[in-house]
Image (tube, rainbow, N blue to C red):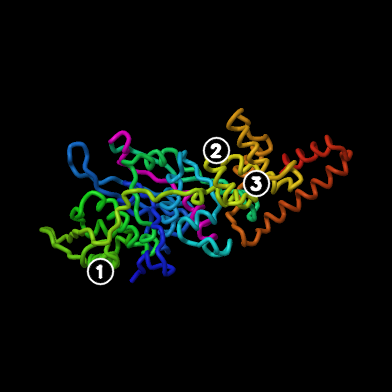
């Protein structure tokens, strides 16, 4: 039996929320069997039922293409990152944060956890798989237009610092079509992420669907057992009907044990021998009607400001006084300058550099330096495997770094040792790289 979320660590803790998209939770995104879902070039075909304008029930056809495969566990990061993005003061379709911040806010590590290890590798691998997914549906509900539409979109893309030991934030950019379907209140719902995290993958999927339904009604519509088991939860369609029923019984029992639903599963036979199931809302189901109060320490910029040398009080003042997007951009510039040029780059200190540039960006429109744009272009254009702090560098990275040092020595031997020539040599090395 899963543990109750409020019993963790022997103390009460603030409930965290995930963010689900109303249509996506109507069906599985990949098979439950990781032997089938974590293969390369997986194409998963499924569907869901909806009522058209004439109130006739139709089945939408869905095709999820996963070049790197997709694990049912990857959905946790999808819903969690969406929640963190939309919790920002002015969500703009991008989320910038350190991996430690993300995992801490999602409840996978605490503030004292080692900044490396299994959780970070799993997060990096899930992010890479999600970035390659292509989703297509012939009847996806658009909450802004109030109609079902034919859609094709990805979930996200990312840009990471080249140095795995960097303090700079990871950048996650949501597909604009997908994000426009998530952002409106009619396209999203909040759910208890603490409860979701403790469940197995099949129970997680049913919990999401029930969280959507139980927000507005105390009882589900009548589910066809095969559709619920195969299309919604992702069990194999080749299983016998009795096996689908047995698996659903175990999933419902898991949710009943923590009070999400009432009682065990009761199946009813129809006229054509098909089985159906109705579930009722349990006594401990949480609707999460209001977002939790957000503090400055919840900001994805918090870790970067502390890494730069700000004390908590100064970091809070900066986040309270300056626009989030401006601080986000200049924090990344400052961290990149410190890692690229060293402490000697700053006339006074990295903190003073950041504060001065944030103030000038707000008052006089100061823009980012050219070298930072060049660095971001390199990060977007240079493919590399995802790595995190604590992982070993790849052999290809060692070769690139070594070749860059050789190029620098050659240019220093060819050009005189003055400032102008040194800058020219630097540009040549960067262009060849």
Q: Which residues are magenta?
A: 120-146
In magenta segment, residue 286: no
> Residue at 21% across / 42% down in the picture?
51
Q: Are marks 1 and 2 in contact (CB under 8 Å)?
A: no
Circle 2 sits in a helix, a strand or a loop, which is it? Answer: loop
Q: Which residue is mark 1?
A: 246
What label sits on residue 322 in the rendered view?
2
Is residue 61 rendered to the left or right of residue 361? left
Of all residues, the one furthest to the bottom in this rendering is 1
Mark 1 against mark 2, which lies toward the viewer?
2
Residue 366 higher or lower than 109, as above or below: above
Where residue 273 sits: x, y (%)?
14, 61
Is residue 32 rendered to the left or right of residue 396? left
Mark 2 against mark 3, which lies toward the viewer?
2
Q: Earlier in the sequence, mark 3 or mark 1?
A: 1
In magenta segment, residue 137: yes
Label 1, residues with CA under 10 Å away: few <14, some 14-19, many ≥20? few
Where residue 422 sits: x, y (%)?
82, 39
Q: Which residue is mark 3?
A: 335
């Amino acid at each position: 039996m899963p543990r109750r979320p409020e019993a963790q660590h022997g103390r009460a803790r603030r409930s965290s929320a995930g963010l689900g998209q109303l249509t996506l939770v109507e069906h599985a995104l990949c098979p439950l069997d990781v032997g089938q879902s974590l293969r390369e070039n997986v194409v998963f075909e499924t569907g869901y039922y909806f009522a058209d304008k004439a109130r006739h029930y139709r089945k939408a056809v869905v095709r999820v293409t996963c070049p790197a495969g997709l694990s049912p566990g990857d959905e946790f990061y999808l819903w969690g990152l969406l929640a963190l993005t939309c919790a920002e003061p002015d969500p703009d379709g991008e989320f910038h944060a350190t991996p430690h911040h993300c995992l801490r806010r999602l409840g996978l590590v605490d503030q004292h956890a080692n900044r490396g290890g299994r959780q970070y590798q799993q997060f990096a691998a899930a992010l890479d798989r999600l970035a390659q997914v292509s989703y297509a549906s012939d009847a996806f509900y658009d909450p802004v237009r109030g109609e079902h539409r034919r859609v094709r979109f990805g979930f996200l893309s990312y840009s990471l610092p080249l140095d795995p030991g960097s303090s700079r934030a990871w950048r996650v950019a949501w597909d604009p079509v997908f994000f426009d379907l998530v952002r409106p209140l009619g396209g999203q719902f909040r759910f208890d992420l603490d409860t979701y995290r403790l469940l197995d993958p099949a129970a997680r999927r049913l919990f999401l669907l029930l969280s959507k339904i139980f927000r507005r009604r105390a009882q589900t519509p009548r589910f066809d057992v095969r559709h619920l088991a195969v299309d919604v939860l992702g069990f194999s369609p080749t299983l016998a009907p009795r096996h689908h029923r047995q698996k659903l019984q175990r999933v419902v029992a898991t949710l009943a044990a923590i009070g999400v639903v009432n009682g065990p599963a009761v199946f009813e036979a129809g006229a054509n021998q098909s089985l159906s199931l109705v579930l009722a809302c349990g006594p401990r189901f949480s609707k999460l009607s209001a977002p939790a109060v957000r503090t400055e320490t919840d900001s994805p910029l918090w870790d970067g400001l502390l890494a730069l040398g700000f004390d908590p009080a100064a970091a809070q003042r900066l986040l309270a006084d300056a626009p989030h997007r401006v601080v986000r951009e200049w924090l990344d510039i400052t961290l990149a300058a410190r890692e690229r040029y060293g402490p000697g780059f700053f006339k006074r200190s990295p903190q003073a550099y950041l504060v001065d540039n944030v103030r000038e960006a707000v008052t006089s429109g100061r823009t980012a330096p050219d070298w930072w744009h060049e660095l971001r272009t390199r990060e977007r254009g240079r493919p590399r495997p995802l790595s995190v702090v604590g992982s070993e560098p790849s052999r290809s990275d060692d070769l690139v770094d070594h070749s860059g040092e050789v190029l620098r020595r050659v240019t220093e031997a060819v050009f005189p040792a003055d400032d102008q020539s040194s800058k020219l040599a630097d540009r040549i090395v960067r262009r060849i790289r």
